Amino acid sequence: ALSTPSAPMKLRDAPSACPSLWRCLPCPPAELRLDLVLSSAQSFRWWESSPGSWTGVVGERVWTLRQDRDRLWYTVYGEEDEHEEEERDGCSAKAAKLNGAEADGILRDYFQLDVGLSALYRTWEAADPLFCKVAKDFPGVRVLRLDPIECLFSFICTSNNHISRITAMIERLCQAFGRRLCCLNGRTYHAFPTLSALTGTDAEDRLRALGFGYRAKFVSGSAQAIAEGLGAEGLSQLRTAPYAEARKVLCALPGVGAKVGARSGVGWGVGCSIRGSQCCWLQVADCVCLLSLDKAEAVPVDTHIWQIARQRYGVAAGGKSLTPRAYQEIGDFFRRLWGPHAGWAQAV
């Protein structure tokens, strides 16, 4: 028998839309502020699909998340090649082949919910009066745990760039090289490209055609270097390596070790904000260490953090420019001040 085409999938923007397709995790705002975290340029794959609802890709699945008081609500969409249709609550929706416990585990890992954020805030407030002033306005800011491949190649794209352009570039990258997952309300979602997808002989040319400019060489070069070296699994295994070792390995990669001068940045090493700086590569490496390799002590230092360290904390580091030595001194200062989760404190 011929299979009939499935009905278009609709975005579910709240638990009231197909309640049985939503689940929730206990999560008070002090532990997670969804809006602050998903808009903070840690990941470039989320968008506010309706007021208070965020849709994006995690673990090769498309999710919509919503926070309601002390609960984190989520729904997961099935892939287009999963032909298991279900009729629930009057909604025709593809059922994701993912049980509740698995889905809970993926989100808990992604948001690192096992890390007690409220206790960390209290520790930072006790150690740093300046942090107290900031913390009142920015509660619940935690660090994501991204896939290392996605994190690395996303942040290679950040040099001399700004958030909206980076987001568009990552979207084009996924559309061109990633596996199609599903289409919701006419918007198509793709998985992040695999390492093998980025090592093709024409990858650099295709990336240039997508508007990646000089970054095309760094993306394809790093993909090739990883494929021929430690591999995607080896990159993930850096999670168990010491921070200094992991950063050293990353700095040997094209686009990370390459000292790319840039003009302006907006946190997380998004763009290197010192003209001709030798520290862009350290920023990228530290972002990858912090956001995907479990190095909570990694402190990405950009111009903004450098100026704060000098003007508000009295750190005498660097002269007219941010040097690698000054970069290290600033990171060490904040590690002494904020402790082993210094990178999390810097995110606030």
Image (cartoon, rainbow, N blue to C red):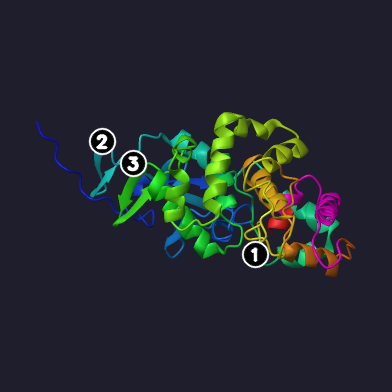
Query: Seen in the image, is 303 located left or right of residue 291?
Result: right
Which part of the image, by quadrant, shows the N terminus? Answer: top left
In-front residue for pair 103/235: 235
Labels 1, 2: front one: 1
Residue range (magenta): 318-344
- Between residues 288 and 75, which one lies in front from this camera angle? 288
First in residue order: circle 2 vs circle 3: 3
x and y, in percent, of residue 46 in the image: 48, 55
Inspect the magenta stretch and tell me whether residue 29 lies in it. no
Q: Name the kind of residue labelled 1 in the image.
A: Gly
Which comes before the other along the chain, label 1 or label 2?
A: 2
Residue position marked by numbered label 3 in the rendering: 78
Q: In terms of secondary structure, what is the magenta stretch mainly?
A: helix
The label number, if any, that marks residue 84 in the structure image: 2
Residue 195 vertical placement versus 39 (above, below):
above
Q: Earlier in the sequence, mark 3 or mark 1?
A: 3
For label 1, the residue is: 265
Mark 3, mark 1: which one is toward the viewer? 1
Q: Quadrant of residue 158?
A: bottom right
Contact, CB < 8 Å: mark 3 with mark 1? Answer: no
Whole-percent x and y of residue 303? 73, 64
Q: Is residue 90 left or right of residue 291?
A: left
Q: Residues within 10 Å of mark 3 (few under 14, many from 20)?
A: many
- Asked if the residue at tag 3 contacts the one at tag 2, i.e. Cβ–Cβ closer than 8 Å, the answer is yes
Are the residues at dot 1 and dot 2 in contact (C-beta closer than 8 Å)? no
Circle 2 crowding by C-alpha within 10 Å: few under 14, some 14–19, many from 20: some
